[in-house]
Amino acid sequence: MSVPVPLDELAAAVERFGPIGFLMSGGGDGRPRINHVRLRCEGPVLHTEVGWGTAAALRERPLVSCLWPAGDAEELSLIADGTAELVDGGEPGPDGRIPATITVTWAVLHRPPDTAPC
């Protein structure tokens, strides 16, 4: 079961799930890159910071997804798709992290499967 999240309700959904999630982007060899990140939401825009490897991937392949996984089998996960952009030309901050934004184009709450694990 999937429940669409209107973009004007995204900030409330992110607040409910908390600031820690996963950023999924495309790696140079075709495999997905998955990074544990801190996300802050303002309207339909997510703010985060990434390392140099993820920044390089975002320059080449800006289409990304963010995931806040369900805490247990009775809860829903939050998934948001969007386009990433490096802030300030991709210059790292004092801690070496590179600020990025993700303009969300679609979000959904998704129920875990009913089946038992393999």
Image (spheres, rainbow, N blue to C red):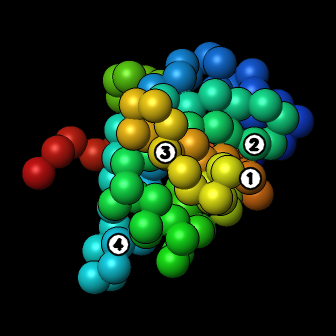
Q: Is residue 13 visible?
A: yes
Per the model, the C-alpha gap separating discs 4 and 1 is 20 Å
Name the residue furthest right: 8
Q: Which mark is residue 27?
A: 4
Q: Is residue 18 rendered to the left or right of residue 44? A: left
In the picture of the structure, the residue carrying the numbered disc 3 is 92
Determine whether 30 is above or below 97 in the image.
below
Asked which secondary structure carries label 3, the reply is loop
Q: Residue at x 56, y 56 (%)?
A: 90
- In this rendering, the label closer to the viewer, 4 or 3: 3
Task: Measure the alpha-carbon separation of dots 3 and 2.
Answer: 20 Å
Front residue (pair 115, 59): 59
Q: Amino acid at mark 1?
A: Thr
C-alpha gap between disc 4 and disc 3: 20 Å
Q: Earlier in the sequence, mark 1 or mark 3?
A: 3
Q: CA distance from mark 1 to mark 3?
A: 20 Å
User: Are discs 1 and 2 less than 8 Å apart at CB?
Assistant: yes
Q: What amino acid is at disc 4?
A: Gly
Q: Mark 1 highlights which residue?
A: 103
Q: Do tag 4 and tag 1 residues touch (Cβ < 8 Å)?
A: no
Amino acid type of the residue that numbered disc 3 sits on in the rendered structure: Pro
Binning the other alpha carbons within 10 Å of mark 1 as few (below 14), some (14 to 19) or many (20 upward) gives many
Q: Are marks 2 and 4 in contact (CB under 8 Å)?
A: no
Q: Which quadrant of the view contains residue 22?
A: top left
Left or right of 98 in this view: 26: left
> Could you say which disc has been placed on residue 45 in the image?
2
Say which element carries label 2. strand
Q: Is residue 111 visible?
A: no
Q: Mark 2 and mark 3 in contact (Cβ < 8 Å)?
A: no
